[in-house]
C-alpha cells in the first residue's frame, strides 16, 4: 500500500467515524421524542420519512443519521 493509499484510507475512516446511523422502530410518538432530542442537540443530520411496519403492527420505521462530535 502506497503512502497516498494509506492517507486516503485513514481520511475515509475518520469521516465515517463522525456519524452514527440508526434504524428506529417504534410508535410515532416515541420516534417524535427521539427526533426532538437529536434535533435540539444539533446532532441530527438526516431523517427518513416514516415507513409503516405493515400488517396490524402500529409501529413505524425511520432511519436517522446523527453527528457524533
Image (cartoon, rainbow, N blue to C red):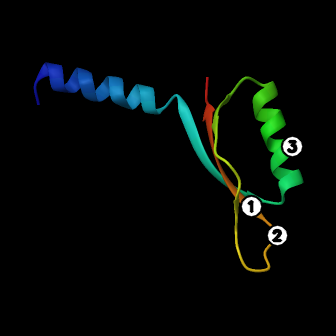
Horizontal side of 60 relative to 68 (left or right) equals right
> Which is nearer the eye, 18 or 57?
57
- Outermost residue toward the left in this view: 2
Q: Which residue is drawn at 31% across and 26% down?
A: 10
Whole-percent x, y for residue 33 in the image: 87, 43
Q: Mark 2 and mark 3 in contact? Answer it, CB < 8 Å.
A: no
Give the foreground label among 2 and 3.
Answer: 2
Q: What element carries label 3?
A: helix
Tag shown at residue 33: 3
Looking at this view, is 57 or 37 the one in front?
57
Q: Cα distance, mark 1 to mark 3?
A: 14 Å
Q: Residues within 10 Å of mark 3 (few under 14, many from 20)?
A: few
What residue is at 81 percent from the left and 26 percent from the top?
Answer: 40
Q: Quadrant of the C terminus?
A: top right
The residue under label 2 is 58
Q: How far is the residue under mark 2 from the one under mark 3?
A: 17 Å
Q: Residue 60 carries which label?
A: 1
Above-or-below relation of 59 to 6: below
Q: Considering only vertical position in the picture, is 50 above or below 40?
A: below
Amino acid at each position: 500500500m502506497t503512502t497516498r493509499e494509506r492517507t486516503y484510507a485513514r481520511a475515509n475512516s475518520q469521516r465515517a467515524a463522525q456519524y452514527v446511523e440508526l434504524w428506529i422502530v417504534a410508535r410515532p410518538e416515541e420516534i417524535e421524542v427521539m427526533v426532538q432530542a437529536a434535533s435540539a442537540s444539533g446532532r441530527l443530520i438526516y431523517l427518513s420519512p416514516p415507513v409503516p411496519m405493515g400488517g396490524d403492527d402500529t409501529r413505524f420505521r425511520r432511519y436517522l443519521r446523527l453527528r457524533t462530535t
